[in-house]
Image (spheres, rainbow, N blue to C red):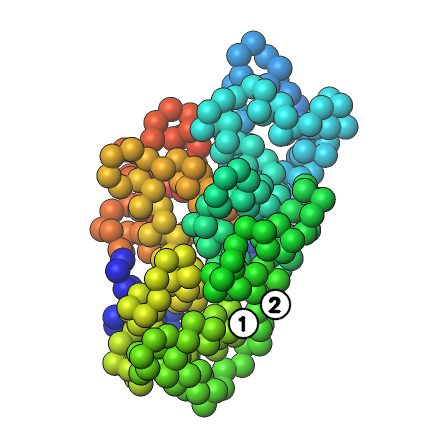
Amino acid sequence: MADLWDDLESFANASSSFTAVPGERGTIKAKANFNVSEDVAALCKAIEGIGTTEKTLIEILTHRSSSQKQAISKAYQETTKRILVNDLKGDTQGKLEEVLVALARPPAVNDAKWLIEAIKGAGTDNSILIEILSSRTNKQIKELSAAYSEETKKTLIQSLKTEVSRDFGKAILLLAEGARDESTNVNADQAREDAKALYNAGEKKLGTDESKFIEILCKRSIPHLRQTILEYKNISGKTLQKSIEKEISGSLEELLVAIVKCVMSTPAYFAEKLYKSMKGAGTDETTLTRVMVSRGEIDMLDIRAEYKKLYQSSLYKEINSDVSGSYGECLKMICGGED
C-alpha cells in the first residue's frame, strides 16, 4: 500500500472509522443473555482443573464485550480472591498468554501497557508510539493517559518528554495531549488554505517547514483533514502522503504518513500493519496480537474488508497459514470468520 489513495475519488466518501463506536464494526461483541456467574464458574473450572482448558478461555474472552469482561474480572476476584489476569498469566504461556491477558484487560490499560513497553529500556520503540497515538480518538487518548498515570505514577506527557525530541517529539506530545479539534463541520475554504499552507511549507520551497505539517496534521479535525487532503491533490497534483515522503524523513515522516493514512482509512492502515506483521520469513507476533486485540471490538469487520481489497486474500486465511495452535485459534476467533 504505497499510496492507497492515488485515486482520491473513492476516498472522499469512504468511512475512516476513526469515529467508529465499539461494537458497531467489531467482531468482538456483547453476548446476548450474558450471565456473569456462569462465565466465572466456567473460567474457574478451566483454570483450576488439571491442565488448563484453553478452549474455554478463548471462547469466553473472544465472545464478550469489554464491559462484560470487566464485570467477569470483578466477579472472578470476589469469588476466588484472585485476579483473573494473574491467573491467566500463571496458567498459560507464550503468545497465547499475551493475547488472553490483553483480551481480559480494558482497552485503555492495554494501550498504556504497550506504551510503557515502547518507552522502557534503552531506546524507544517509536513505531508503537506512532501506531497508538496516530490512530486513537481524543477520548481513547484521555483514557489511556489515565491508565498510564495509574500504572506508572507519572503522566504520559512527563514520560514522553524524556524519550522524544526535536520535531518528532513536538508532534508526539501534541497527539498525546488528546486535544485534536473534534468539530464535524468542514469549511472547504479553510481546508484549501491549509492545503496551500502545506504545499508552501514543502513542495513549493527549498527546505521544509516541518512545524506547519505538525500543526495542521496533529491539531485539525479528522473531517477537516480529509477535505484538506483532497484540496492538496488539486493544488499540487500529488497526494499529501507522497509529498511528506519526499520532503520529510525518519520518525517524523513515519508519524505524519500514519496520521494521513488513519485520516483516510483507519481500517486500511491496520490492514497494512497486519499484512506486514505476517509477510516474509517469521511473524511479528507482538504487532499481530496488539492490532487484533486493539481493533477486535472497534473495526475488525472493516479491516477484514480492506485486507481483502488490498491483498486479494482473506485475513482469516493468512492468520490460519501463519500462526498455529491455541494462539492461532484465538486470533481466528477475533478475526471472526472468513468474510
Q: Is residue 158 left or right of residue 164?
A: right
Of all residues, the one furthest to the top in this rendering is 50
- Look at the numbered disc 1 and give the secondary structure of its residue: helix
Which residue does the image show at 26% across and 41% down from the upper left?
279
Q: Give 63 or 16, whichever is nearer the viewer.
A: 16
| Label 2 vs 1, first from the N-terminus | 2
Tell me the distance, in whole angstroms, between the alpha carbons under discs 2 and 1.
7 Å
Place residue 266 in its image quadrant.
bottom left
Question: At label 1, which amino acid type do we have?
Answer: Lys
- List x then y, in percent, for residue 4: 29, 64
Relative horizontal placement of residue 28, taking residue 200 as reference (left or right): right
| In-front residue for pair 12/196 | 196
Residue 38, image x, y percentages: 65, 28
Q: Name the residue under label 2.
A: 179
Residue 92, image x, y percentages: 52, 21
User: Which residue lies at the image location 73% right of the left edge and 28% below the top edge?
Assistant: 77
- Which residue corresponds to mark 1? 219
> What amino acid type should be assigned to the residue bearing mark 2?
Ala
Q: In this view, does 133 lie above or below 206?
A: above
Instruction: Return the x and y of residue 11 as percentages of the image width and height.
Output: 34, 71
Q: Crowding at label 1, few (<14), some or many (≥20) Cα neighbours within 10 Å?
A: some
Does the residue at mark 2 contact the one at mark 1 (Cβ under 8 Å)? yes
- From this viewpoint, is residue 284 visible? yes
Residue at (59% x, 55% y) in the render: 161
Residue lying at 41% horizontally and 41% vertically, measured from the top left: 287
